[in-house]
C-alpha cells in the first residue's frame, strides 16, 4: 500500500496559509488544488484527506504555532466505513487513497481469539520496523463482580517463590493445589541472567552492550509471560472454588524492606506490579472479587492465634508461632494472612454502614478491622 499521505500534507499547508480550518471552507479552498497537485487522487480520497486535516486542526488549533505535519508513517485511523472484516478468512479490507486492499492478518493466538469472537471497533493502522500493524479496539462483555461465596484466596508474591497461595500451592506449579516447594527453575533462570548481565557490564564493550540490550528484552518477555501464567492460574482457581482474590498492596514495600541485595533487586522490579495488574483485569473480566491488602507483618503474624512477632520466624522461609506452636512455610502462612485480610477488607467496604468506612474504595481498601489483632 502507499506510504504517507501527500494529499493531507498539501491541504494542511493550504489550511495554514489561509487560516482556514473548517471542513466546508477547506473543501472550497483545497479540493481542486489538491487534486491537481497529487497524481491519481480520486474525489473520494480528496474529501477524506480534507476531513482528516480539519480534524487534526480542530483538536490542536489553539496551540498550533505552525502547519500540522502529517508524518510519513503516522497512525492512520480506521472506522467501520473504511474497513471491513472477513473473520472467517482472517482478512481485512482497508480503504487506501488508491483504492481498497484486502490483506490477510496474523497475530498471537489469544489476540486472534479475541478478534474472532468479540465486537470490533475502530482501529489504527501503524507502520513499525517494516511491519504494518492494525491496532483494533474490542468491546469486552461486561461481567458483574460476584460476591465471593467461599471467602478469599490469598497469594503471597515473593522472591524465593514467585507466588504461593493460602492453599499451599506454589505457582506456576505443575498442578493446583500442590505441595510447597522451591520454585527452582524460575529462580535459577533469573540468577543466571543476572550473573551474565554483570559479566557483560564489566566488559563494557559495544558488543557487550548490544548483548545486554537483547537480554533485557528477553528477560522482560520472560517475566511478562510468567505473570500472564501466574495471574491466569490464580483467577482460574478462584473461579473454580468460588472465592475472591487478595494480593499484597506493594506500595510502600520498597521503603520498608531491609532486604539483602538479591531481594532488593527483585522488589525494585516492575514484575510484582505487573502481576497485580494482570490479576486485577483478569479477575474483573471473570467477575471475580479482587482486593489489595496491607502487607505489613503478613509474614510475622500467626493466622491461628494472632501473635505477631519477629520471633515467629526462626529461619528464612520457616514460620513457627512462639505462642501457639503453629508451624509452616513462611510464604504459605503469609498467604493465609493475606486471604484473611482480603475477606475482612471486603466485608468492611461492602457493609459501609456497619463499619463506618463509607469512603473506602473497594479494590484499594487494605486495613483489617482493629479487632482481629494484627
Ligand atoms: Zn499462633
Image (cartoon, grey):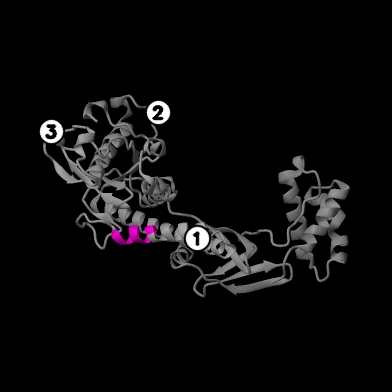
Q: CA distance from mark 3 to mark 2?
A: 37 Å
SS at circle 3: loop
Nearer mark to the viewer, of 1 and 2: 1
Alpha-carbon neighbours of circle 2 within 10 Å: few (<14), some, or many (≥20)?
A: few
The answer to whether the residue bearing label 3 lies less than 8 angstroms from the nearest atom of ligand 1 is yes
Q: Identify the disc placed on residue 200.
A: 1
SS at circle 1: helix
Kindly indicate whether the residue at mark 2 contacts the one at mark 1 (C-beta within 8 angstroms): no
For residue 83, which quarter of the picture?
bottom right
Q: For this rendering, which residue is in front, 52 or 272?
A: 272
Magenta highlight: main SS: helix
How many marks the image carries: the answer is 3
Q: Identify the disc placed on residue 323.
A: 3
Q: Quadrant of the C terminus?
A: top left
Where residue 25 appears, x then y in whole percent? 83, 50
Q: CA distance from mark 1 to mark 2?
A: 51 Å
Nearer mark to the viewer, of 3 and 1: 1
Q: Which residues are magenta?
A: 184-191
Q: Quadrant of the N terminus?
A: bottom right
Kindly indicate whether the residue at mark 2 contacts the one at mark 3 (C-beta within 8 angstroms): no
Mark with earlier residue (1, 2): 1
- Name the residue furthest front: 203
The residue pinned by badge 2 equals 359
Amino acid at each position: 500500500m502507499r506510504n504517507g499521505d501527500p494529499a493531507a500534507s498539501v491541504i494542511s499547508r493550504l489550511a495554514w496559509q489561509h487560516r482556514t480550518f473548517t471542513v466546508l471552507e477547506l473543501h472550497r479552498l483545497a479540493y481542486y488544488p489538491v487534486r491537481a497537485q497529487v497524481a491519481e487522487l480520486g474525489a473520494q480520497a480528496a474529501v477524506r484527506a480534507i476531513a482528516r486535516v480539519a480534524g487534526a486542526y480542530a483538536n490542536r488549533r489553539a496551540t498550533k504555532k505552525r502547519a500540522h505535519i502529517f508524518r510519513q508513517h503516522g497512525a492512520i485511523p480506521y472506522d467501520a466505513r473504511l474497513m471491513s472484516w472477513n473473520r472467517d478468512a482472517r482478512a481485512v479490507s482497508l480503504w487506501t487513497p488508491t483504492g481498497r486492499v484486502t490483506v490477510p492478518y496474523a497475530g498471537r493466538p489469544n489476540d486472534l481469539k479475541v478478534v474472532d469472537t468479540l465486537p470490533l471497533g475502530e482501529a489504527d493502522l501503524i507502520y513499525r520496523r517494516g511491519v504494518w500493524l492494525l491496532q483494533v479496539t474490542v468491546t469486552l462483555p461486561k461481567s458483574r463482580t460476584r460476591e465471593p461465596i467461599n471467602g478469599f484466596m490469598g497469594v503471597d508474591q515473593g522472591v524465593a517463590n514467585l507466588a504461593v497461595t493460602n492453599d499451599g500451592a506454589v505457582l506456576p506449579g505443575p498442578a493446583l493445589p500442590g505441595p510447597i516447594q522451591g520454585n527452582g527453575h524460575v529462580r535459577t533462570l533469573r540468577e543466571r541472567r543476572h550473573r551474565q548481565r554483570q559479566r557483560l557490564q564489566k566488559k563494557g564493550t559495544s558488543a557487550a552492550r548490544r548483548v545486554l540490550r537483547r537480554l533485557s528484552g528477553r528477560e522482560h518477555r520472560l517475566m511478562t509471560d510468567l505473570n500472564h501464567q501466574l495471574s491466569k492460574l490464580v483467577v482460574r482457581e478462584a473461579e473454580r472454588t468460588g472465592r475472591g482474590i487478595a494480593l499484597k498492596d506493594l506500595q510502600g514495600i520498597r521503603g520498608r524492606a531491609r532486604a539483602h541485595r538479591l531481594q532488593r533487586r527483585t522488589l525494585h522490579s516492575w514484575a510484582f506490579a505487573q502481576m497485580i495488574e494482570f490479576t486485577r483485569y483478569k479477575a474483573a473480566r471473570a467477575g471475580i472479587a479482587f482486593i489489595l491488602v496491607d502487607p505489613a507483618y503478613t509474614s510475622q503474624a500467626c493466622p491461628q492465634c494472632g501473635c505477631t512477632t519477629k520471633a515467629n520466624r526462626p529461619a528464612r522461609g520457616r514460620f513457627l508461632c512462639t505462642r501457639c506452636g503453629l508451624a509452616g512455610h513462611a510464604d504459605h502462612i503469609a498467604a493465609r494472612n493475606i486471604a484473611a485480610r482480603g475477606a475482612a477488607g471486603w466485608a468492611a467496604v461492602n457493609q459501609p454502614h456497619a463499619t463506618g468506612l463509607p469512603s473506602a474504595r473497594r479494590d484499594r481498601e487494605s486495613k483489617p478491622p482493629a479487632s482481629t489483632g494484627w
